[in-house]
Image (cartoon, rainbow, N blue to C red):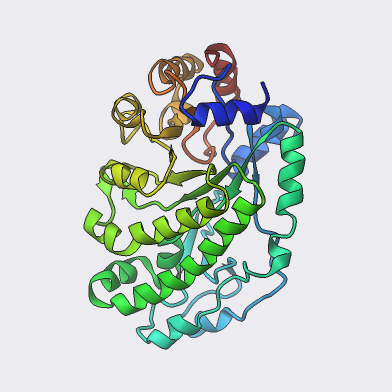
């Protein structure tokens, strides 16, 4: 059975030969640890991930985002900007990967600033021209193909606007929020169509709309601003390729909106963070309608547990959320700097041992 066959069977909530596996990104320090010990620069190959990703080619355009940060008392020499123009400043006191977000439209309440704000040129053909060929090549090798569209709406919008400002605007300045979200939505719809046309097997969508104990915003606000927009993105992909899978990611505990995510066409829920939700209970309640991806904790077991703890958790996941198919096993987020080589290897060794059906 090929990796793609295994993935598609599992995501149809049937039983493949073994559980599909995925490898999440590695933080820079974890990547150093991996390369030093594995003698490889490719974690997906080394750990036999069944899923391989595609995404946009780098942009050839460089909008003038600096004007949004000048005069704000920032150390411009330490400021970097991502493709959406969001500023990042890395701490001087750590070698970790975390950065402080600087939102370019934080201080503006002028609707025209949101209308005219430069967004990435994802619609330019050169950004996605390689997708069909790359997907076909990965399929030929037997892999399932995932298409990157995480931080779909909420996260990109608040990063541009500012987190607190965005939350306030949802109540007090809906015109600003709707303008920004609709502009991002148009890009996402087009991307979903192109990914589906390129024959990707799953589009990775989602936003961190929840925290450890529940939703960041109320379900009512999520419905007002995000549910119908996510539905439009999903519909756009499925009009092109009806059988394409849609994975929705939110860290934390978004159980309050699980039913509605499934209703609008989400077929895979990620990451099912075990520090926040009970994977076994989630499988029992929703497992006849949706599949799951992740469920191996990166807050406790992987960085701080013993090899035996890791073995025990993999075995438990297979006996519960993995029962009957409908599961891709993997870490719930990027591999943290604290994760030792022994523990990372133990995770995939345990999947080898306990992952067969």
User: Percent from the top left, x then y, of residue 330?
Assistant: 52, 30
The image shows residue 147, relative to residue 74, as above or below, that is: above
From the viewer's side, name the closer residue of 107 and 257.
257
- Identified at 56% across, 38% down, the residue is 24
Q: Nearer the viewer, residue 14 or 114?
A: 14
Task: Kindly identify the residue that appears in the image at 57 percent across and 78 percent down.
Answer: 65
Residue toward you, 192 or 270: 192
Residue visible at 33% across and 24% down? 280
**Quarter of the view holding residue 279:** top left
The answer to whether any part of residue 333 appears in the image is yes
86 vs 230, left or right, is right
**Image quadrant in which the N terminus is located:** top right
Q: Position of residue 328 (x, y in %)?
A: 51, 29
Is 179 placed above or below 163 here? below
Residue 41 visible to an observer of this rendering: no
Q: Give the image quarter of residue 63.
A: bottom right
Residue drawn where x is 48% and y is 50% of the image: 205
Q: Is residue 37 left or right of residue 91?
A: right
x, y percent for residue 166: 33, 69
Is 264 above or below relative to 339? below
């Amino acid at each position: 059975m090929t990796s793609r066959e295994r993935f598609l069977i599992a995501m149809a909530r049937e039983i493949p030969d073994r559980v599909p596996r995925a490898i999440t990104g590695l933080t820079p320090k974890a990547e150093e640890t991996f390369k030093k010990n594995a003698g490889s620069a490719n974690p997906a190959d080394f750990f036999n991930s069944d899923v391989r990703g595609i995404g946009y080619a780098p942009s050839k355009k460089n909008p003038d985002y600096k004007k949004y940060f000048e005069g704000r008392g920032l150390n411009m020499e330490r400021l970097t900007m991502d493709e959406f123009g969001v500023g990042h400043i890395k701490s001087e006191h750590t070698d970790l990967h975390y950065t402080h977000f600087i939102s370019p439209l934080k201080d503006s309440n002028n609707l025209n600033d949101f209308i005219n704000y430069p967004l990435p040129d994802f619609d330019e053909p050169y950004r996605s021209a390689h997708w069909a060929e790359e997907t076909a090549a990965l399929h030929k090798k037997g892999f399932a193909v995932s298409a990157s569209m995480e931080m779909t709406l909420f996260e990109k919008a608040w990063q541009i606007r500012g987190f607190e400002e965005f939350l306030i605007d949802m109540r007090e300045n809906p015109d600003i929020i709707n303008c920004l979200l609709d502009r991002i939505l148009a890009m996402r719809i087009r991307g979903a169509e192109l990914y589906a046309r390129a024959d990707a097997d799953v589009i990775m969508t989602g936003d961190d709309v929840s925290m450890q104990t529940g939703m960041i915003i109320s379900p009512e606000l999520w419905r007002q601003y995000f549910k119908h927009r996510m539905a439009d993105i999903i519909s756009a992909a499925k009009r092109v390729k009806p059988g394409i899978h849609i994975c929705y990611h939110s860290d934390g505990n978004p159980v309050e909106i699980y039913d509605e995510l499934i209703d609008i066409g989400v077929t895979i829920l990620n990451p099912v963070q075990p520090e926040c939700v009970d994977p076994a209970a989630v499988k029992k309640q929703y497992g006849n309608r949706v599949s799951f991806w992740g469920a191996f904790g990166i807050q406790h077991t992987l960085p701080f547990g013993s090899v035996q703890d890791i073995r025990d958790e993999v075995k438990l996941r297979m006996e519960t959320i993995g029962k009957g198919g409908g599961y891709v096993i993997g870490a719930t987020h990027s591999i943290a700097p604290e994760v030792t080589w022994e523990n990372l290897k133990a995770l995939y060794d345990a999947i080898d041992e306990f992952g067969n059906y």
